[in-house]
């Protein structure tokens, strides 16, 4: 560590005839410090946004959706739901229904996917 401190102090300390070198060194160090600080702040903001968005999305939707390939629903879903609730690490299970709907307002119309669940479950 002594060698590194010697090299750093030699180049950071300017002699009288090399005063410009000292000013350039200080400006360079300040520029690098500002760049590193900006990078750290940008990464922190990005990471915070990602965690917030992930928490909001996972809080609204289920982690796993069990669906049939055909859109006619799952027959005898009550025993299946009871069996799924007994699986380890399953905290909650609820039946749901998905359907496409037509949404219109005045001359504008569009399709949407609607999801219905039983709020008590």
Image (cartoon, rainbow, N blue to C red):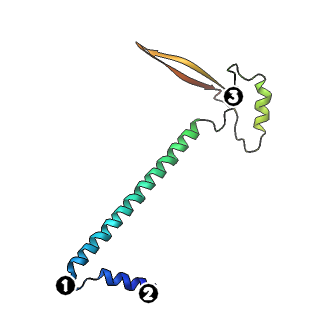
For label 1, the SS is helix
Q: Position of residue 8 (x, y in %)?
A: 36, 81
Q: Position of residue 16 (x, y in %)?
A: 20, 85
Q: Position of residue 63 (x, y in %)?
A: 64, 39
Q: In the image, is residue 84 above or below residue 9?
A: above
- Nearer to us of marks 2 and 1 is 1
Point out which mark residue 17 bears.
Answer: 1
Q: Residues within 10 Å of mark 2 (few under 14, many from 20)?
A: few
Residue displayed at 30% across by 70% down: 28
- Give how far apart the Cα atoms at labels 3 and 1 are: 79 Å
Which residue is tagged 2?
2
For label 2, the SS is helix
Q: Residues within 10 Å of mark 1 (few under 14, many from 20)?
A: few
Residue displayed at 77% across by 26% down: 78
Q: To which quarter of the image does residue 11 belong?
A: bottom left
Which residue is tagged 3?
67
The reply, left or right, for residue 113 in relation to residue 79 is left
For label 3, the SS is loop
């Amino acid at each position: 560590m002594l060698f590194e401190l010697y090299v750093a102090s030699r180049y950071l300390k300017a002699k009288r005839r090399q005063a410009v070198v000292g000013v350039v060194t200080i400006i360079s160090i300040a520029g690098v410090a500002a760049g590193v600080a900006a990078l750290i702040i940008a990464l922190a903001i990005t990471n915070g946004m990602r965690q917030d968005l992930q928490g909001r999305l996972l809080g609204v939707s289920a982690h796993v959706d069990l669906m049939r390939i055909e859109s006619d629903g799952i027959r005898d879903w009550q025993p299946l739901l009871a069996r799924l609730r007994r699986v380890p690490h399953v905290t909650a299970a609820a039946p749901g229904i998905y359907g496409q709907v037509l949404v219109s307002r005045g001359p504008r119309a569009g399709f949407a996917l609607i999801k219905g669940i039983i709020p008590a479950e």
